[in-house]
Amino acid sequence: MNETLLKVEDLRTSFFTHLGEVKAIRGVSFSVRKGEAIGIVGESGSGKSVTSLSIMRLLQHPGKVTGGSIVFKDQEILKITEKEMRSIRGNEIAMIFQDPMTSLNPVFTVGNQIVESLRKHQKMSKEEAGKKAVDILKMVGIPDPAKRANNFPHEFSGGMRQRAMIAIALSCQPDLLIADEPTTALDVTIQAQILELMKSLNQKLDMSTILITHDLGVVADVCSRIIVMYGGLIMEEGSKEDIFYRPRHPYTMGLLKSIPKINNEKQRLIPITGTPPDLLNPPSGCPFYARCKYAMVICRTKQPPYFEVDEGHRTMCWLLHPEAPGNADYEAQQGGVRSEAGRQ
Ligand code: SF4
């Protein structure tokens, strides 16, 4: 699974509003390997959804990619024609959204919509596609799939609709599935079922997945690698274990303290106070400066570079600079590991 499927480099996306240029993404780089499931996590306005819409070339006016590169299977997505992009969107990259009703067509049965997708993308006969549609509905856990294929979307519950949406996305056998907040509108039990489904499909179909969410808890079970975004930049990237057990960026640490943990009744949840930066006038220094309790003078004026904490684990924070003044509280949060990685 070392083959790179998607490589995003120095991506920059802005919205040209009447108030000026809102720099929603300010230089984002990451890659997704074949069969890998990654999570992109961040608050609303962090740039996570704009990143996925930029990859899909689905940005609406006044949004525009202003720089960087997006290479999917050795093809520069930003340079191909709209027709070529439509073919990639239908056949190789699929996307599912928070509200399936915005993507499902209310006037066609669920089975019909899968059949149409199969016939369009896989050139199947109507009969073949009908059989395959039932198989796909079964695979995504729809009970009595032959019968339910004849139902309209409004006859499905919220969780079933999201399963139907995943079924349509899978009908083109994509190499990459991008799921943007797929479980936010669902209750906790159904959410767990959909996440379990996504995890098993990722493993079974060897399909890469990008799961976009504001909730770190959601990516824990599905993704092996996590990217934490803030203010249009990646603050930290690492394996699931790095992010959950060895976080180095104060923002990631704050996010972790704001999610409830199972079996910890006495846990006090600590929200991150303050508001995200104004991307109409992005800060010249660290975007988290105004909310960071460890902020130093340099943080206000100079954006930190990425510091490699460990292989595959990087973070954008001046505290990792070898000559940064020590911060006892921060080091205590690290359990003393800072000396190993940051200040040899
Ligand atoms: Fe806080 Fe400075 Fe690190 Fe930003 S660079 S997260 S302000 S310590």
Image (cartoon, grey):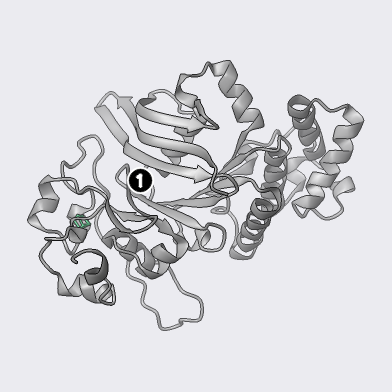
- Ligand 1 placement by image quarter: bottom left
Q: Residue 230 at what x, y percent from top left?
A: 32, 49
Whether residue 273 is visible here, answered yes or no, is yes
Name of the residue lying farthest toward the bottom: 266
- What amino acid is found at the position of numbered circle 1 in the picture? Ser
Image position of 149 with respect to 242: above or below: above
Rendered position, 209 above or below 196: above
Left or right, 247 with reference to 105? left
How far from the left and from the top, in percent, is residue 184?
54, 53
Going 16% across and 41% down the picture, which residue do you hit? 284
Q: For the C terminus, which image quadrant? A: bottom left
Q: Is residue 169 above or below residue 60?
A: below
Residue corresponding to mark 1: 46
Q: Residue at x 66, y 61 (%)?
A: 193
Would you say 343 lies left or right of 216 here? left
- State the residue at coordinates (24%, 45%): 277
In the rendered image, residue 269, in percent from the top left (x then y), is placed at 36, 72
The residue nearer to you, when weighing 303 against 158, is 303
**Alpha-carbon neighbours of circle 1 within 10 Å: few (<14), some, or many (≥20)?**
many
Describe the element under mark 1 as helix, strand or loop. Answer: loop
Observer-nearest of 304 and 339: 339
